[in-house]
Amino acid sequence: MNTQNNKWEFKQIVTKSIMEFGTEICFIKENQFICVSENQDGQDYICFFELQNQQFQEQFNQQIKLIFNNQEYNEPLFPIMFNQTKRIILLRHKFNIYILSQQFHNTYRISTKLQFQHNIIQGSMTNDAQYMVLWEKSNSCYFIYKIKQNQYGQVQQN
């Protein structure tokens, strides 16, 4: 935003290597954001973009491929959640809930994956990233999970 006259100032059009659509975007740092992309050919990815030389650039070496499913679209019911203190990302894509943990060199990997029977899943994570609550259509009930991390900060799957 331009602070002199309180108007928004356009900066950049960011292009992606995989031409598709996505329903979730989240900044995980002031200079880095992720988006979950989906393609009916099964190219479903988490794409990372980082600010370099005043332009956001796709970081191909950080791209994470998600579970293939070309039968369903991703429903925009579950925003990406990021906990800066614990450096974990919680997101849903189609039938799956993913928790990503930050690795060395500021890269992320999937540390936990939960698969459900339906793609209508809603959820949230507590501010301290100790718990997540999920609601899934076919069960019509809430599931509460405690998020555990090992001494290296990696999320442990139970």
Image (cartoon, grey):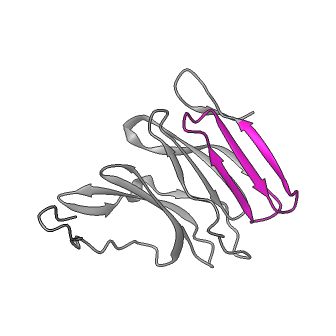
For residue 70, side relative to residue 103 (left or right): right
> In which quadrant is the N terminus drawn?
bottom left
The quarter of the rendered structure image containing the C terminus is top right
Q: Nearer the viewer, residue 139 or 50?
A: 139
Which residue is at 28% across, 62% downward? 56
Furthest residue toward front: 5
Task: Give the number of marks.
Answer: 0
Specify whether residue 16 is painted magenta: no
Q: Is residue 48 left or right of residue 64?
A: left
Q: Quadrant of residue 51?
A: bottom left
67 relative position to 115: left or right: left
Residue 121: in magenta span: yes
Work out which residue is located at the far right of the displayed protein and give it.
139
The residue sitting at 25% across, 72% down in the picture is 12
Q: Is residue 83 above or below residue 76?
A: above
Name, please, the residue furthest toward the top: 151
Task: Residue 125: give x, y in percent of width and height.
Answer: 62, 43
Q: Bounds of the magenta span?
A: 116-145
> Going 46% across and 37% down the picture, which residue do you hit?
103
Answer with the quarter of the image where residue 139 lies. bottom right
Q: Position of residue 11 (x, y in %)?
A: 22, 70
Visible residue check, residue 4: yes
| Up-down relation of residue 10 to residue 100 (above or below) | below
Q: Nearer the viewer, residue 55 or 6?
A: 6
From the top left corner, tell me how far across and down residue 53 is, in percent: 17, 58
Tell me if I can see residue 115 in this picture: no
Q: Residue at x 52, y 24 (%)?
A: 152
